[in-house]
Amino acid sequence: NLNSVDGIIFPLEKDFKPINAEGLDLIVDIPRGITSEENLKRRLSDFKNKGFKFALCGNLSAVKIAKEIGFLIFADAGLNLANSESLKTAEKFGIVKAVISPEETLGNINKLCGNIDKGIIAYGNIPLMFFKNCPLKNGISCKDCDKKGYVTDRLGEKFRIRCRSGYSELLNNRPIWLADKQSGFSTLDFIILYFCDETKDDVESIISAYKNGTVCNSTYTRGLYYRGTI
């Protein structure tokens, strides 16, 4: 059920099967770690031929390559756009949409100026750390891990490790939840629901919750949107 959904962000490394996407923005998500520019260009061309219009870019190399292929550029949180000056610079690079850094507060985000469409990650277990060397490899093989590995902190909290194109990311142990706080970011042009390993039923339930402004009934975090980094 894609009612009220404006677009779909799909990972570059996965195979996209045709869907009824009329009226939707199709956005290909480029991994932050690029191991082969030639492979990246080939995959982007495949997605372009499947009707994808935007490329979600988390570093400047991805911006350059995606522009060469003919994509409109959607800046990911990895570009760390956090103030009006950075948005103006992004606009000069040809960026048309931007995910504002999740380290910024909603109060400051609502004050941002510029012509670029602005949004935030309003739901999801967002990446906290980025690794070239997987932190699990000293204790378990990739085969035994089967992409289900995690690390545990001193409080016993488990943080999932996600592998993408030769790199690893540590995901937050709790999802951001802002479904019941949407009146606080009415100046934004969009919000992103960042799904990783949720089931189909989970996805439907969460989309419904954000349509209805539902309070979360499980563990969650507000991220740094209300307390900042200091």
Image: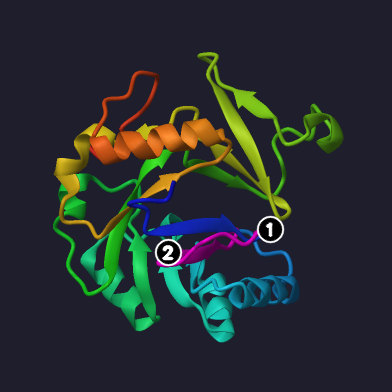
Q: Quadrant of the C terminus?
A: top left
In this rendering, would 57 be left or right of 136?
Answer: left
Whether residue 113 appears in this view of the structure is yes
Residue under the point 65% across and 59% down: 16
> Which disc number belongs to residue 24?
2
Residue under the point 70% across and 30% down: 149
Give the label, 1 or 2, closer to the camera.
2
Would you name the residue on which mark 1 appears? 13
Kind of element beneath mark 1: loop
- Residue 53 part of the magenta-drawn span: no
3D distance between C-alphas at marks 1 and 2: 21 Å
In this rendering, would 133 be left or right of 26?
Answer: right
Sequence-first disc among 1 and 2: 1
Q: Amino acid at mark 2?
A: Leu
In this rendering, would 206 be left or right of 129?
Answer: left
Quadrant in the rendering for residue 90: bottom left
Quadrant in the rendering for residue 68: bottom right
Q: Amino acid at mark 1?
A: Glu
Whether residue 223 appears in this view of the structure is no
> Image height check: is 132 above or below 88?
above
- Residue 21 part of the magenta-drawn span: yes
Q: Which residues are magenta?
A: 13-32
The mark total stands at 2
Residue 32, image x and y in percent?
58, 59
Residue 204, image x and y in percent?
44, 37
Determine crowd level at label 2: few under 14, some 14-19, many 20+ residues with C-alpha closer than 10 A: some
